[in-house]
Image (tube, helix red, strand yellow):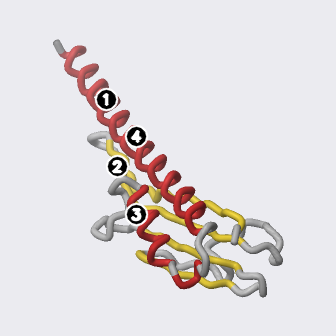
Amino acid sequence: MVELALVFILLVMLLVGTVSAAVAFGRGNSIQNAAREASRYAATLPGVETQFGDVISVARSAASGDLETTTPGYFICVAYLDAGGTWHRSTEGSFTPPASGCYDDQRPGSEERVQVVAGRETSLEAIVFSTDITLSAEASARYER
């Protein structure tokens, strides 16, 4: 009985940890999809720098509820590099972007492109163990207009 009780506790911890990790993995996939969808959408917009709100809405809807405004620690950053080498950027949530764009993608400064970063905070739990992590995804697309 004692051995069963000890093993049962370990098995329950393992099960809860596995479920928590699976939920975080699903959220990560959802956020990656949102960043890709938003960057592809933004790359086709005429005058994308005036339509950042639409791009953020596309990211939010593609994230299947993982980037809602009520989600604690969420962020979305959309940046556009125009032909003159000037960055136009809009952020929402708790994200402080660098001086250029949303992230450094190591591409030439002469290439028109759109960058999207999306993410949120979540936690991994296994009954006696818990840790907070930030899930984020980056996507870049060449501007097509």
Q: Residue at x 32, y 40 (%)?
A: 126
* Mark 4 burial class by Cα count in 10 Å: few <14, some 14-19, many 20+: some
Q: Earlier in the sequence, mark 4 or mark 1?
A: 1
3D distance between C-alphas at marks 3 and 1: 30 Å
Identify the residue under disc 4.
Answer: 21
Q: Earlier in the sequence, mark 2 or mark 3?
A: 3
Identify the residue under disc 3.
Answer: 60
3D distance between C-alphas at marks 2 and 3: 27 Å
* Position in image of residue 79 (x %, y %): 60, 76
Q: Residue at x 44, y 50 (%)?
A: 30
Q: Earlier in the sequence, mark 2 or mark 1?
A: 1
Residue 15: image tag: 1
Mark nearer the viewer, 2 or 1: 1
Identify the residue under disc 2.
Answer: 130
- Nearer to me, 44 or 112: 44
3D distance between C-alphas at marks 4 and 1: 10 Å
Q: Residue at x 33, y 45 (%)?
A: 125
- Nearer to me, 28 or 41: 41
Mark nearer the viewer, 2 or 3: 3
Left or right of residue 74: residue 9: left
Say what secondary structure mark 2 lies in: strand
Mark nearer the viewer, 3 or 1: 3
Looking at the rendered structure, the kind of residue marked 3 is Arg
3D distance between C-alphas at marks 3 and 4: 22 Å
* Position in image of residue 92 (x %, y %): 44, 77
Contact between labelled residues 4 and 2, with CB atoms less than 8 Å apart = no
Q: Quadrant of residue 50?
A: bottom right
- Nearer to me, 16 or 38: 38
